[in-house]
Image (cartoon, rainbow, N blue to C red):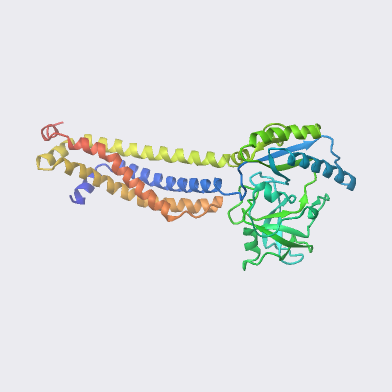
Amino acid sequence: MTLPPILAALKKHKAGVTLITLQIALTLAIVCNAVFIIGQRIDKVNRPTGMNEQNLFLIQQMYVNAPSGDDPDSIAKRDAMIRTDLAALRGLPGVEAAAPVSSLPLLESSNNGGVGLKPNQQDSTATTTFYSTDDQLLKTLGLHLISGRNFTPNEITRDPGGNYEPPMAIITTALAEKLFPSGDALGKTIYFNGTATPTTIIGIVARLQTPNTEAGNSRAWNSVLLPVRPDDSYTRTAVRAKPGQLDAAMREARTALIAVNPQRVISNGFKGFVGIYPFSDVRARAYRADVGMAILMGVICVILLAITGAGIVGLTSFWVGQRRKQIGIRRALGATRRDIVRYFQIENLFIAGVGVVLGAILAIALNLWLMQQFQMDRMSIAYVLVGVVVLLLLGQGAVFAPAVRASHVSPVEATRSV
């Protein structure tokens, strides 16, 4: 079967051919970029925090009667209240470890700053998130210390209520590689926020994600642990329950804290900024918008593909009805049913081929626009190639049923005057 007869037939249906070609092109452009966005969202949702999230829960609470001043006496009283709570939690039978934290990954609450390699360095070498905590955090979060050592209890100090640059810190592998590409970060001196106060790296953990879920992969794991016990009327405590005792430990934790000091704001669930809840709730809440976006994009892709497929079916069915006489003549001249089916398949392949070429150009152009407007990553050409194959297969599948119906047209019936 040659192409000229197909082109001659398509010239008689220019409007329909143009519309279905543009529909295929737009579908390819939108679907490719939508699938790319879905892939990015899935990667983001599955991005590891570096913690062992099993049996981990968070307590966020506020003291009602805590001193609010920044004077040494008020700070000491608040610190004593926090240490009393920690002792009560660590003494529970269902608790394996507990640590005070200024924040946690995915909480969207962070203390960020710069890290430099020289005193008073104004342009930071890297941006990082500071986690204030004590010597129990590694055990509580299940962090993997790959080199160096943990803080010791006597190295933990309380927050003095001002800018504090500790003499030591534990950093993540990602930050260590950023600061010291040669791989010799352990024992080196760094400087925070453009100051001249030196801080020695005493340990390196494999990974700890920052609280900001929007941070790109280049800085998502730039974290620093400081041996500074947070000091505030509003506290956060990470608690690791013993295996299989998460729910029981959460109930016991509330009871124990109320017994120590009932004058606090706390609840059994996530209510505003206070509550006791598993870290799985933190993860679900942090990525709720991303999951919703992925689902929405998936629905849009399905709808577009369904509309395109239905358009091909409808247009081909319409053409079959208009060409009954032409089909009958071909049958009378010896064309088999297979020839008729092949004719419509080749015709659709030609239309879809033009459509996917235009669509591929549109897909790349749309991605470039999204990169400029929304700082998206460049889409891999593989998405476009897969999209081209899917649209071509969709076209062949959509045209098959109408083509088979056309092949069953009787030569006698089709050659009657209409």
Q: Nearer the viewer, residue 9 or 174?
A: 174
Residue 334 relative to residue 371: left or right: left
Determine whether 131 is above or below 255 in the image. below
Counting from the top left corner in percent of width and height, residue 113 is at 71, 55
Counting from the top left corner in percent of width and height, residue 418 is at 16, 31
Q: Residue at x 37, y 43 (%)?
A: 23
Quick one: which residue is furthest to the bottom in this view?
A: 182
Counting from the top left corner in percent of width and height, residue 357 is at 35, 52
Quick one: which residue is furthest to the front in this view?
A: 93
Let me know if residue 79 appears in the view. yes
Q: Nearer the viewer, residue 334 or 262?
A: 262
Let me know if residue 211 appears in the view. no
Residue 346 relative to residue 140: left or right: left
Residue 84 relative to residue 357: left or right: right
Counting from the top left corner in percent of width and height, residue 53 is at 61, 44
Q: Nearer the viewer, residue 393 or 244?
A: 244
- Count of numbered marks: 0
